Image (cartoon, rainbow, N blue to C red):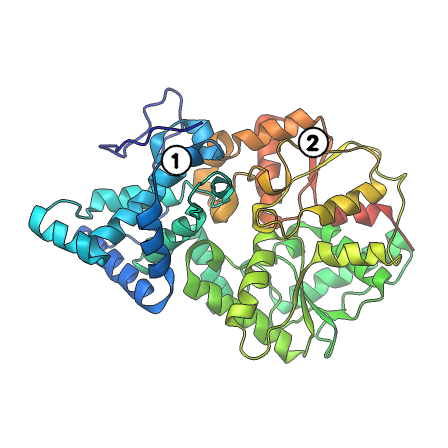
Amino acid sequence: MSAKIEEKKTTTASSTPGAVQRRYSFYMENPPASDRVRRFLDALAAILQQSNYQFVLDVYSRVCARCGRCAEPCQIYQATGEPEDIPCYRSNMLLKVYQRYFTAEGSLRGKFLGGGLLTDEKLDELAEAVYHCTACRRCTIECPMGIDHGLITHLGRYALSEAGIAPKGLVVAVREQLEGKAGNTSGIPVPALRDTLEFLEDELLESKGVPIKFPLDQEDAEYIFFAAVSDYLLEADTLMGNAAVLHAAGASWTIGTGYFDGINYGLFYNDWVLERIIQKLVGEARRLRARKILIGECGHASRAAKVFVPAFAEGAPIPVLNFMEFTLQALESGKLKLDSNVITERVTYHDPCNISRSGWIVEQPRQILRAFVKDFVEMTPHGTENYCCGGGSGIVSLDEVHDYRMKIAGKLKAEQIRATGASIVVSPCANCKKQLREIVEFYKLPVQVVGLHDLILKAIRF
């Protein structure tokens, strides 16, 4: 299926009957109107000068056919039917800016023929468009030219953020992580972390009869463990499942009190922020002389570490594992014992885009689930082609767009879940869990959303 790409004259509220109001406030700051365009162009110029994005934009601006084939796999466009939600339409907004201001041909054409100027209205349209996208990259499956529209979305957000235009929810969380006293996105101080882990150890001893520990600041461990810090507040069963697997495997591991947050929202909107957070993570691993980095059940934290630790770490890069890779190794080696009679409900699995779209973490969780879950069913589609939860690219953290996440971005995911007839949805990602639980509540789905290691905790035997 192809969609016709047409220019829109306005970017006000949607004309679709009953549609969600398209505009929402996400600016961290709003520079004066006379300044905004200049600041954006200056920011984009600096990014292009100091990175390899210019090569990417140059290639994409030459090959983008605006054919609309990316419309069919896009769940946002499928929900709205609006042209500005077609990935190549959105990407073309930034590509036209690049051609007009950063290529010789575009500059000459603009000088002698006029037109193509970036205005405040067009900047607003671009800002809204890049935050309607969940950056799931499902559109890349159908693009005949291999254009990564998710990357263009990210670059647009990056330039906007450097111009002072970014979602409050993301910027505030990052400020707490990089500059706050606690040094993490949830503001958890070390004493509270210690209390939480002691409580979880007591729970494990009572429920499993085994003294399972959460070691802190152990030097020379094989693994240093980074969970999404929100897990320490909201996902006790996931964390206890993680610790139980590590105990069963006899692993040497630790959590660092100098830095223990796996979250990296820079991945969603700003490379400079992304790098600073990676440096904190690597610095803690170096401090404790850990040999490997083990990321918990978090899709974006796993991708950020896997891709950017090698890019930003000084010295020899530290190997990065997603926890499901570790768990599968423990299962295949015979160290992890799971009772196949414990989980009797029908279970389905949600593929987080950040770890599945590239084909990195796809079969591992399924191998684990099939080892102890008798009634496992797949969503359609699934794996590398699965639909995003609807809260990807950080928009799950923006409470002001809740209606958008439910009625548009998460609509197809709700239909997917309902069609499986499952009672349990396994989602190994902190952001996906939050979004899916809200979808379940919004659409009144009779399912429970859990982490993979929540189920493992129930089935593990020592």
Residue 385 seen in the figure: yes
Q: Residue at x 29, y 65 (%)?
A: 46
Left or right for 248, reference 310: right
Q: Who comes first in sequence, dot 2 or dot 1?
A: 1
Q: State the mark number for residue 156.
A: none
Q: Secondary structure at mark 1?
A: loop
Report the quarter where the C terminus lies. bottom right
Q: Residue at x 65, y 40 (%)?
A: 350
Q: Nearer the viewer, mark 2 or mark 1?
A: 1
As rendered, which of 450 and 347 lies closer to the eye? 347
Q: Residue at x 71, y 46 (%)?
A: 363
In the rendered image, the vertical position of residue 256 relative to residue 33, given as above or below: below
Left or right for 391, reference 214: left
Q: Provide the residue designation for mark 1.
A: 86
Q: Position of residue 187 (x, y in %)?
A: 55, 61
Report the quarter where the N terminus lies. top left
Residue 28 seen in the figure: no
Left or right for 357, reference 174: right
Mark pair 2, 1: CA separation: 31 Å
For the residue marked with disc 1, what is the amino acid? Ile
For the residue marked with disc 2, what is the amino acid? Val
Q: Position of residue 302 (x, y in %)?
A: 61, 57
In the rendered image, the vertical position of residue 100 relative to residue 190, given as above or below: above
Q: Tell how many labels.
A: 2
Q: Position of residue 380 (x, y in %)?
A: 63, 31
Q: Provide the residue designation for mark 2.
A: 447
Residue 316, quarter of picture: bottom right
In the rendered image, the vertical position of residue 315 relative to residue 366, given as above or below: below
Q: Residues within 10 Å of mark 2 (few under 14, many from 20)?
A: some
Q: Residues within 10 Å of mark 1 (few under 14, many from 20)?
A: many
- Furthest residue in direction left, as rendered: 112
Q: Secondary structure at mark 2?
A: loop
